[in-house]
């Protein structure tokens, strides 16, 4: 069985569709992948999830759209704790047919695994502290070629001032050259094995190569895809619009080693989240260690609403073999 470390996709061949843009620029936006009706439902599902906590959040009262009324762990609107990765609506979104079809087309297989990733619900009335850019990639320097493509299922209009994904267009093409030219592999970062953060001078190196920093904009129901080798980071909104999305990444099941498949199935049974990677880096994303600001009396090890279990879910989760 081939593994991702042995896999190289032909990104130089013309396909005559959106894959050419992804391979050329390192990112692409696929329009209208999820219906407006489903997008609105997922936003309401997010609100319902927030209202289940005992902090007094009320979707109809913007006065409650503040940190004191929201779950403790929230980083720039991103939620990765409380077993949110396995809420029923999260698994419903992961099974959106045209989302899965996009990744099937990308990888050339219907046998996929999905990441146990989180969601982002950034509210306009939520006070935001200024944050510094944190440009990074999510693929180890030791992994060669395209091995992971990340995804955002976007549910609300996301324009230039609405916060979101920043990318350095074309930077994925220079990843291997960068690590050959810079002696930085021993530098410690706060991320896992497939996370590497760049200093401002190193971002300048990519700019000198002609890589342009861009804010990715998307409409309701769009699917944003980006190569994990593309330098990117998240920015907070400057507007008063909500940001609502689910992070989801799919890769071929054949990429996973047997031990990793076993770990993935075990974490699914435990309803734990993982990293962006569906087939590797299989370990729990333990957010308990990150909740330092106040005591969290609402810690959860299971979702409020368990996912509806079917063969699609079990196969995407690595629990059932293809």
Image (tube, grey):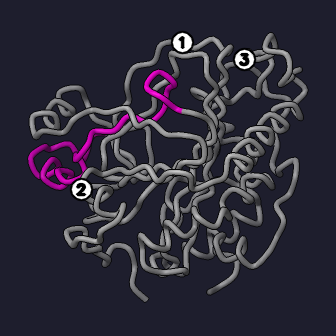
Considering the numbered disc 2 on the image, is that residue within a helix, a strand or a loop? helix
Residue 14 place in picture, x, y as percent: 23, 70
Q: Residue furthest bottom?
A: 1
**Front residue (pair 66, 4):** 66
**Front residue (pair 274, 117):** 117
Residue shown at the point (19%, 54%) measured from the top left: 173
Is residue 169 located in the magenta-colored stretch of the structure? yes
Dot in front, 3 or 2? 2
Considering the numbered disc 3 on the image, is that residue within a helix, a strand or a loop? helix
Q: Quadrant of the C terminus?
A: bottom right
What residue span does the magenta drawing correspond to? 158-187
Is residue 79 located in the magenta-colored stretch of the structure? no
Residue shown at the point (19%, 69%) measured from the top left: 12
**Front residue (pair 299, 32):** 32
Q: Residues within 10 Å of mark 3 (few under 14, many from 20)?
A: some
Q: Which residue is mark 1?
A: 129
Q: Which residue is mark 3?
A: 67
Question: In the displayed structure, would residue 252 be above or below residue 184?
Answer: below
Cα–Cα span, label 2 and label 1 = 35 Å
Residue 289 place in picture, x, y as percent: 64, 36
Question: In the displayed structure, would residue 49 be above or below residue 126?
Answer: below
Q: Are marks 3 and 1 in contact (CB under 8 Å)?
A: no
Question: In the displayed structure, would residue 278 be above or below residue 150?
Answer: below
Residue shown at the point (87%, 47%) measured from the top left: 304
Q: Which residue is mark 2?
A: 24
């Amino acid at each position: 069985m081939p593994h991702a470390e042995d896999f190289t996709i032909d990104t130089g061949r013309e396909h005559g569709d959106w894959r050419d843009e992804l391979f050329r620029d390192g990112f692409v936006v696929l329009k209208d992948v999820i219906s407006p009706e489903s997008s609105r439902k997922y936003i309401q599902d997010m609100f319902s999830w927030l209202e289940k906590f005992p902090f007094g959040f009320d979707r109809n009262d913007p006065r409650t759209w503040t940190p004191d009324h929201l779950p403790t762990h929230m980083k720039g609107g991103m939620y990765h704790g409380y077993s949110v990765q396995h809420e029923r609506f999260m698994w419903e979104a992961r099974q959106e047919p045209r989302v899965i079809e996009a990744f099937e087309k990308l990888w050339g297989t219907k046998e996929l695994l999905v990441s146990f990733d989180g969601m982002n619900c950034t509210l306009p009335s939520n006070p935001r502290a200024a944050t510094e850019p944190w440009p990074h990639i999510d693929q180890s320097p030791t992994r060669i070629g395209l091995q992971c493509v990340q995804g955002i299922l976007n549910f609300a209009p996301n324009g230039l001032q609405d916060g979101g994904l920043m990318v350095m267009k074309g930077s994925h093409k220079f990843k291997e050259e960068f690590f050959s030219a810079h002696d930085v592999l021993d530098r410690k970062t706060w991320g896992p094995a497939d996370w590497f953060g760049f200093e401002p001078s190193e971002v300048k190196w990519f700019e000198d190569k002609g890589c342009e920093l861009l804010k990715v904009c998307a409409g309701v129901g769009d699917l944003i895809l980006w190569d994990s080798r593309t330098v990117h980071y998240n920015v907070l909104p400057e507007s008063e619009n909500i940001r609502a999305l689910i992070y989801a990444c799919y890769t071929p099941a054949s990429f996973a080693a047997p031990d990793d498949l076993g770990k993935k199935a075990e974490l699914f049974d435990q309803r734990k989240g993982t990293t962006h990677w569906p087939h590797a880096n299989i370990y729990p994303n333990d957010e308990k260690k990150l909740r330092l600001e106040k005591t969290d009396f609402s810690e959860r090890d299971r979702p409020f609403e368990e996912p509806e279990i079917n063969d699609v879910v079990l196969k995407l989760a690595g629990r059932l073999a293809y």
